[in-house]
Image (cartoon, rainbow, N blue to C red):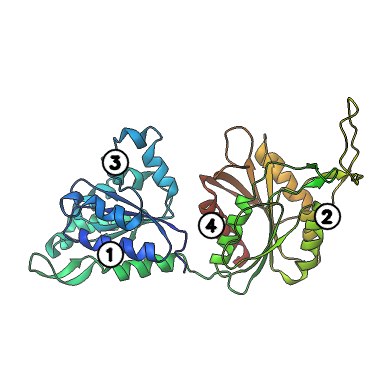
Amino acid sequence: MSLANRHILLGVTGGIAAYKAAELARLFVKAGAEVQVVMTASAMEFIGAMTFQAITGNETRSDLFDTTHEAAMGHIELARWADLVIIAPATANFIALMSQGRAGDLLSTLCLATTAPVAIAPAMNRQMWANPATQSNIRSLEEHGRLVWGPAAGEQACGDIGPGRMLEPTQIFDAASEMFSSGALTGIKALITAGPTHEAIDPVRFIGNRSSGKMGFAIAQALEEQGAEVTLVAGPSSLPTPPGVIRIDVESALEMHAAVMKRTGDCDLFVATAAVADYRPERVADSKIKKTAESLDIRLVRNPDILADVAALENGPYTVGFAAETQDVAQYADEKRRKKGIKMIAANEVGGKRGGFNHDENALLVLWEGGQQELPMTGKLRLARQLVELIIRKIHA
């Protein structure tokens, strides 16, 4: 199901159709999505917050000035968390607020702050819907990229008959599902590397790095969601394998190189997310090295460059690299892209309190010949989906 593990933020505003939002939340949860409900004050006059909390398992949010959440900038947290924001029902009043860019409560504020798609499902009396002011507001929202789902026509709570009814929950659910199931990579075979490598010093010790593998695993999932046949070559990691992904576990850079080169002839896309060790000990001790001397010298030799070797293949796959830098990110990443001859590189700044290694969030600067795009700080799965959308555009171009 395309909605599995998606973050759906369901906004509920104050109309009689608010009772239908409970069924919509249930459909999303049943499909495997994580649902966070945000209600306006007027919505609570029609349906209780506990109803949504029982359905979703998450606290229903409503107050912009909730000190518990706003201490951590709760509206920004929610805006970043969402993969899709759906306002159902969307009243004429809330549509007017959105069209004006107002931010008077939690729901309208996060709608302004999010980079996720925002869809509204209008629900109002037919005369309110037909009013020129409402129609102007709808056109304004559409011009700014907001999605408008509905309304439907039929009998309304007031007894009138005509357009203005909120779409049925199943129709909104289907529209949301279609947003995440383009199948743009159907028929594409993708090979991904993820995680660190461990270069043995002796049977106990190794040289490694701080990579968790989270970004690479997220990209593997995002590619599979788009219909690709995905093989993931993973360094040491305890992360679960994304559904539908074939996983090959390796430990060292040499093992990862061998696993990748064995499979490059049968792949269309290669994404090198792994933080592969540049060097390995020249000799690996057969038994544990004892602590007898004041110092220990270990001679290191260079590991093969997996990314460069794949990029150099004749008729090789479309190749995407990663660059983890602590300074001058754009400069070093673009130099790496040109030197290795790869199509695209995704660079991120690591270290300290920034995203990247061992963080659940990350931000990327994506560069290709003649262009670049910044993907702002967000959860790694959402970021992976944004990167995959970029890759899709470049592949099809």
Q: Residues within 10 Å of mark 1 (few under 14, many from 20)?
A: some
Image-based side of 163 in relation to 368, left or right? left
Q: Marks 1 and 3: which is nearer the front?
A: 1
List x then y, in percent, for residue 45. Answer: 15, 50
CA gap, disc 4 to disc 3? 28 Å
Picture disc at residue 307: none
Q: Secondary structure at mark 1?
A: helix
**Disc nearer the start of the sequence (4/2):** 2
Residue 204 falls in which quadrant of the image? top right
User: Tag on residue 254?
Assistant: 2
* Amino acid at dot 3: Ala
- The mark closer to the camera, 4 or 1, is 1
Q: Earlier in the sequence, mark 2 or mark 3?
A: 3
Badge 2 density bin: few <14, some 14–19, many ≥20, Cα 10 Å: some
307 or 296, which is in the foreground? 296
Q: Position of residue 350 (x, y in %)?
A: 64, 38
Real-space CA distance between mark 4 and mark 1, rounded to the nearest whole angstrom: 27 Å
Q: Residue at x 18, y 48 (%)?
A: 42
List the residue tagged with mark 1: 23
Q: Secondary structure at mark 2?
A: helix
Expressed as whole percent of the image width and height from the top left, the position of residue 114 reads 40, 47
Numbered tag placed on residue 103 in the rendering: 3
> In the image, is residue 191 above or below residue 100?
below
Distance, label 1 to label 3, CA atoms, is 27 Å
**To which quarter of the image does residue 393 belong?**
bottom right
Mark 2 / mark 1, whichever is N-terminal: 1
Nearer to us of marks 4 and 2 is 2
Q: Which residue is under mark 4?
A: 385
Spatial CA distance of label 2 from label 3 is 54 Å
